[in-house]
């Protein structure tokens, strides 16, 4: 009877340890994905700003070209 209880206890301990290890792995994955998302969001914001500046510059160039043609 005592051996059976020890066996059951050991099995539960193994299951608990596996569940804890899996939870740690998932938490690590979540943190890595959150960092990657933040990095990609920052990059997107930077590219959006650059795109806006380049569009404004292009519009200025097109506008000045039109002005030169009118002179």
Image (cartoon, helix red, strand yellow):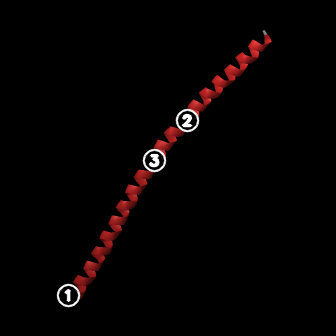
Which quadrant of the figure contains the N terminus? bottom left
Query: Left or right: where does residue 59 sit relative to residue 38?
Result: right
The single residue placed furthest to the top in the displayed view is 71
The single residue placed furthest to the right in the displayed view is 70
Label 1 neighbour load within 10 Å: few <14, some 14-19, many 20+: few
Q: CA distance from mark 3 to mark 2?
A: 16 Å
Q: Earlier in the sequence, mark 2 or mark 1?
A: 1
The nearer-to-camera label among 2 and 1 is 2
Query: Left or right: where does residue 24 sit relative to residue 34?
Result: left
- Where residue 23 appears, x then y in whole percent? 37, 63
Q: CA distance from mark 2 to mark 1?
A: 67 Å
Query: Left or right: where does residue 41 sit relative to residue 27?
Result: right
* Disc number placed over residue 36 in the picture, else none: 3
Which quadrant of the figure contains the C terminus? top right
Q: Which residue lies at the image location 61% right of the left edge and 30% below the top edge? A: 52
* Disc number placed over residue 2 in the picture, else none: 1
- Helix, strand or loop at label 2? It is helix
- Helix, strand or loop at label 1? It is helix
Q: Please determine whether, in this image, residue 35 is positioned above or below residue 13.
A: above
Q: Which residue lies at the image location 41% right of the left edge and 56% below the top edge? A: 29
* Disc number placed over residue 47 in the picture, else none: 2
- Where residue 25 appears, x then y in whole percent? 37, 61
Q: Quadrant of residue 9?
A: bottom left
- Where residue 5 appears, x then y in whole percent? 24, 85
Pointers 3 and 2 in contact (CB under 8 A)?
Answer: no
Query: Left or right: where does residue 34 sit relative to residue 9?
Result: right
């Amino acid at each position: 009877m005592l051996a059976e209880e020890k066996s059951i206890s050991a099995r539960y301990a193994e299951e608990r340890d596996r569940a804890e290890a899996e939870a740690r792995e998932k938490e690590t994955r979540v943190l890595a994905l959150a960092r990657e998302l933040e990095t990609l969001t920052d990059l997107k914001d930077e590219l959006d700003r650059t795109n806006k500046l380049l569009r404004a510059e292009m519009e200025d160039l097109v506008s000045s070209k039109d002005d030169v043609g009118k002179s």
